[in-house]
Amino acid sequence: MTTTPIRPSAPADALLARLDLLRHRVRRAVAARAEDDPQPLDDPFRGLYVSDTMAPHLLRSVPGPLPPDDDEQRATEDLDAAERAAEQAGAVLPLRALGLSPLENDLLLVALAPDLDPGYERCYGYLNDDVSLRRATVGLALHLCGLHPGEPRGRAALDPAGPLRAGGLLEVEDAGRPYLTRSLRVPDRVTDHLLGLLAGPPPPPATPEDPAHRLARRIRPAVGWDDLVLPDRPRALLRDLVRRVRHRERVLSEWRMRPGGGRGRGVSALFSGPSGTGKTLAAEVVAADLGLELRVVDLSAVVDKYIGETEKHLELLFSTADPARVALLFDEADGVFGKRSRPVDAHDRYANTTTAYLLQRLESFDGLTVLTTNVHDHIDSAFLRRLDLVVPFGPPGAEQRRALWDRCLGPVLPRAPELDLGLLADAFELPGGAIRCCALTAAYRAAETGRPVGTGDLLDAVRDEYVKLGRYFDESVLPG
């Protein structure tokens, strides 16, 4: 398989090149079916009835997915590079401009093919084993995209709330039929837009953030490295994380160091340490440096008691997160990335299935994923092996605590001349989150009294914080 250059003046070149890749995949699917099909190919009534020899064949296990072969993998990488070069030369490629995930792109192309090449109609009828189904069905589209029929990420991509259907790019017809035999159709206006034929505005764009807004809180980071008080080692690891994300295109694509096994171009890291030590703030700093929006996943909304719903929610999160502009943060990730247990009942087996799905999905995601945990050992070892970096966050030392007190009080809050931050830093072993709470408490009291914040105000705030944390406050450290 070869890839021809994409002319900046002919954006349809990219679409037709993608269809060439699909033709190769359909050819492989037809060959596989012909080899394993008990019904004669020259039967004039083929697809209109089920023969005695065909019935037992239908009751066998569901055929496996059709993953890309080596030729297709190389051609896909070459085409990705050609599209990037065309965009740098000034081309506007409508398909890439939609901002869809690779899976959503593939599903859209499978559905679009019969509208651009009538040969696909008969091929799809053959693969559907039903001459009346001349468009791609849900089941056939998933098969051609390398997915099992029940795989959550496939169903999530075709969900009514997903970018394809919510954005008006794809229609699922024949609602009265079983799900897998429903036909997929691309509206004519979308086809015209993808071919570059529309002079007016494009069809409504996909809005990946909308379907998943209830599953994650969006943060546009407004912090920098100066806001982060950390020892040299974790700070260096965070810089390394930024470096990996920033240069992954060159290392993984141009230098072709991308690992096999279906792994994506994503970068993943675990931030491990006690509560309040700056893990979430560090994720914000990394996202800000990379110019990314940070989505903090709401695990209470993601995890569902009904079988299959958790995977569906997770797939929606991953598939709607544009790797070029979004980083995912799984705060307190133990809930979904925790260790698998020996299955005792159906609940355990389902939990282990969710963990196995996450392993696969984390590897195939092309963006930045950050996990945080208070206890490193709570994370499943299979996840740890697949992470690019593990950044330890420990309790701050006295020097760091003094810097945290100074930073949390800020440059504007009035301070009394007798304020002794050294005393507070030496006497109370508090993490950064607790120090910030104490600074806020003292600031509110200063706002009410009209006095600058002194050492006594902060000591009272520390006492309240110790009570909140259930810790013993040693009165002997108080001055005089």
Image (tube, helix red, strand yellow):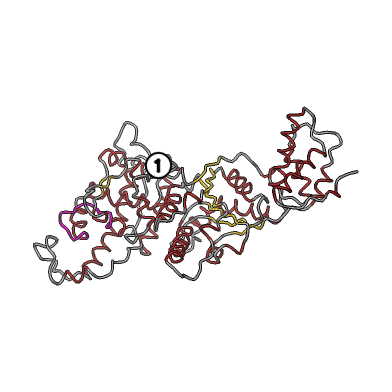
What x and y, as percent, mark residue 232? 72, 54
Q: Residue at x 49, y 60 (%)?
A: 258
Asked whether, in this view, residue 263 is left or right of residue 229, the answer is left
Q: In the image shown, does 381 or 231 lie closer to the viewer?
A: 381
Q: Quadrant of residue 187?
A: top left
Q: Residue at x 55, y 41 (%)?
A: 219
Asked whether, in this view, residue 78 is left or right of residue 342, the answer is left
What x and y, as percent, mark residue 312? 40, 53
Asked whether, in this view, residue 136 is left or right of residue 263, the answer is left
Q: Residue furthest right?
A: 480
Q: Image height check: is 31 above or below 220?
A: below
Image quarter in which the C terminus is found: top right
Give the magenta-colored segment's residue range.
127-140
Q: Is residue 304 magenta?
A: no
Q: Main secondary structure of the magenta part?
A: loop
What x and y, as percent, mark residue 1? 33, 59
Q: Residue furthest left?
A: 44
SS at badge 1: helix
Label 1 packing within 10 angstroms: few (<14), some (14-19), many (20+): few
Q: In the image shown, does 275 or 16 lie closer to the viewer?
A: 275
Q: Which residue is denoted by mark 1 in the rendering?
A: 97
Q: Is residue 134 magenta?
A: yes
Q: Amino acid at mark 1?
A: Ala
Q: Image height check: is 61 above or below 279?
A: below
Q: In the image shown, does 147 or 42 lie closer to the viewer?
A: 147
Q: Residue at x 73, y 30 (%)?
A: 447
What x and y, as percent, mark residue 318? 45, 51
Asked whether, in this view, residue 468 is left or right of residue 146, the answer is right
